[in-house]
């Protein structure tokens, strides 16, 4: 199993745990302590709460894993790998069923011999 997939699974578990812990917390109303008690969300009781500390560490783990996975993805997807996937003459590539009209030159159809006249002349234009 590649480290990228392993860390992606770990991040999904951390994200699910973070959502669960946030939903289990009691709502104190008035976002960021506005309109609540003078202690607000930054009081001593709120900082020492188990769910608050768990939320903080899960958030730190989530952000750290996000940065680590982004760095790994950027390192694995270099410009060289994109250009090689566009190479039409790659070994092991299957031959196309139809010719590529944009890449292959168009061969003009042979012209009719000059010795043959048209079967019937064109009718005159009416005015």
Image (cartoon, rainbow, N blue to C red):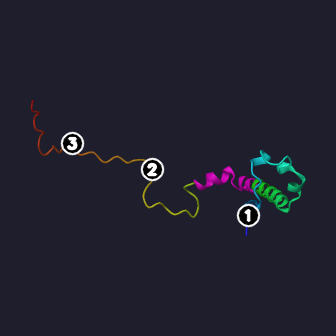
Q: Which residue is mark 3?
A: 114
Disc 2, SS: loop
Distance of label 3 from label 2 (alpha carbons) = 30 Å
Question: Where does the image place residue 84, in percent across and percent down from the top left?
Answer: 62, 54
Q: Give the number of the disc on residue 38.
A: none
20 vs 13, nearest the viewer: 20
- Tag on residue 20? 1
**Depth check: 59 or 37 in front?**
37
Q: Is residue 68 above or below residue 114?
A: below
Question: Which of the pair 75/15 is nearer the observer?
Answer: 15
Residue 109's spot in the image, x, y percent? 31, 48
Lower sequence index among marks 3 and 2: 2
- The 10 Å Cα crowd at callout 2, few under 14, some 14 to 19, many 20 or more, is few
Q: Residue at x 12, y 40 (%)?
A: 121
Quadrant in the rendering for residue 7: bottom right
Q: Which residues are magenta?
A: 69-86
Q: CA distance from mark 1 to mark 2?
A: 58 Å
**Label 3 Cα neighbours within 10 Å, binned few <14 / some 14-19 / many ≥20:** few
């Amino acid at each position: 199993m590649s480290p990228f997939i392993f860390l992606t699974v770990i991040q999904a578990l951390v994200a699910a745990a973070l959502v669960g812990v946030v939903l289990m917390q009691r709502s104190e109303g008035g976002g960021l302590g506005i309109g609540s008690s003078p202690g607000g969300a930054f009081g001593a009781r709120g900082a020492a709460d188990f769910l608050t500390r768990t939320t903080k560490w899960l958030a730190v783990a989530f952000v750290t894993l996000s940065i680590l996975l982004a760095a790994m993805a950027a390192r694995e997807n270099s410009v060289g790998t994109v250009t090689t996937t566009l190479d039409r003459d790659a070994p092991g590539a299957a031959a196309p069923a139809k010719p590529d009209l944009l890449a292959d030159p168009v061969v003009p159809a042979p012209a009719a011999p000059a010795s043959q006249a048209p079967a019937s002349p064109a009718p005159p234009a009416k005015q």
